[in-house]
Amino acid sequence: MTASTDALSIRLLASLSEVAPAQWDALHDGRNPFVAHAFLSGLEQQGCLREEWGWAPHHLSVWDGDELIAAMPAYLKQNSHGEFVFDHAWAHAYAQHGRDYFPKWLAAVPYSPVTGPRLLARDDAQRALLLSAMAQLCERQGLSSAHVNFHQAGEDAAFEHEACGGDWLQRIDVQYHWRNDADAQGRRWRDFDQFLAAFDHKHRKNIRQERAKVARAGVSFRIVEGHDAGDADLATMHRFYLTTFAEYGNHPALTLDFLRHLARSMPQSLVIFLAEREGEAIAGALCLRGGDTLYGRYWGAEVSLPGLHFETCYYQGIDYCLREGLTRFEPGAQGEHKLARGFLPSFVRSRHWIADPGFRGALRPWCRDEAASVRQYARTLALHTPFKAVEAQTQGIATEPGP
């Protein structure tokens, strides 16, 4: 589909194969691997996205002649699976009034509750143009709503731009992130011992005991980065991934061919931590590496050992960040247990445009009340950090959202 506005044209793309990788990747700085053309197109090409699972690519793009000047990765959704911003109550309210909430339009990275750029453009005016076009096309296509999940704080201004009419509702939530922020003298933790020295005695002792249990069990770790990832390692990690999804009765979306694609097309981004005992891999964690951040995505294990999950998913990742000079580690959504291990509350964002003015008006105070509750929850969490008082003062809640 193509529409025109002045000299610009707006196109809806059913596949990222309709855009040259260089054109797409010119719209972002390359620091977030999840918005790379290789990652998103890989999901489409390697069997991870299917319409019967509720994901149909519906990417929005803005062109000046043959030049792509703005875009967002977006999908028509027939359900809310794999999004991590929960709107089941909204869908239920629509159903109660005899209305269809699905399909809806979602700008996000499938299956990835990871903050990153969503409005791929060079300035706020072009970002606002994307949002205005999304709302107008949403209404024209008879969709209930448009959503932008896990966008960056710096993109908030675009949603408030006069071209958007101020109709994008804001929601916030909390995740737990590790941050190696510089102190007043510009110093950062250099190794795991320095990191632990910032903890109070109780939490420091607990972490040492957890790590010691894994070591006494004869477990060692091997880090496999994309350049060195052979097919056997990729197949092993995928087997662990399938094991986790089978345990929870969920549908695994990522295919082994997708992991092979990552190793081949984004080797600088792929990082796998494999736990081994007596020469055999028994657990693994799949991560992606960005500009200054390690992103933990999936884990799985074929044996149950005390502390194995924490060591594989958290402590190995922190060690890696400290060695590699990365200053952020985002290990995934949810999990208050992460707080005691040095992952502090960080706000994450989403925005929502509701086509029906009545529903939009009813949801506005709902979103305000939810945000107030989330802020209070985050303030409570911040009072229970594992760090010593002097350290806790420098490790506040990250990126406080606006009202």
Image: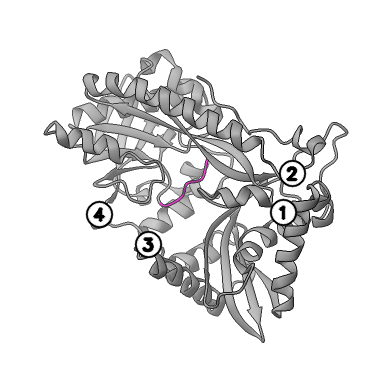
Instruction: Give the mark nearer the N terminus: 4 vs 3.
Output: 4
Q: Which of these two is toward me, 2 or 185?
A: 185
Q: Amino acid at mark 4?
A: Glu
Q: Is residue 249 above or below residue 279?
A: above
What percent of the width, then of the height, locates residue 94?
Answer: 19, 33
Please state the extent of the stretch shown in magenta in the rendering: 111-115
Is the residue under label 1 in contact with that under label 4 (CB below 8 Å)? Answer: no
Q: Which mark is residue 321?
A: 1
User: Of helix, strand and loop, which mostly describes the magenta segment?
Assistant: loop
Q: Nearer the viewer, mark 3 or mark 2?
A: 2
Q: Which residue is mark 3?
A: 253
- Quarter assignment of residue 305: bottom right
Q: Is residue 142 above or below residue 220?
A: above
Does any portion of residue 145 appear in the rendered image? yes
Q: Which of these two is toward me, 271 or 396?
A: 396
Does any portion of residue 143 appear in the rendered image? no
Q: Is residue 114 magenta?
A: yes
Separation of residues labelled 4 and 3 (CA atoms):
12 Å
Q: Amino acid at mark 1?
A: Cys
Left/right placement of residue 107 relative to residue 278 reads left
Is the residue under label 1 in contact with that under label 2 (CB below 8 Å)? Answer: yes
Instruction: Give the mark nearer the N terminus: 2 vs 4.
Output: 4
Q: Which residue is mark 4?
A: 51
What percent of the width, then of the height, locates residue 359?
Answer: 24, 24
The crowding category of the residue bearing disc 1, from other C-alpha atoms within 10 Å (few below 14, some 14 to 19, many at least 20), is many
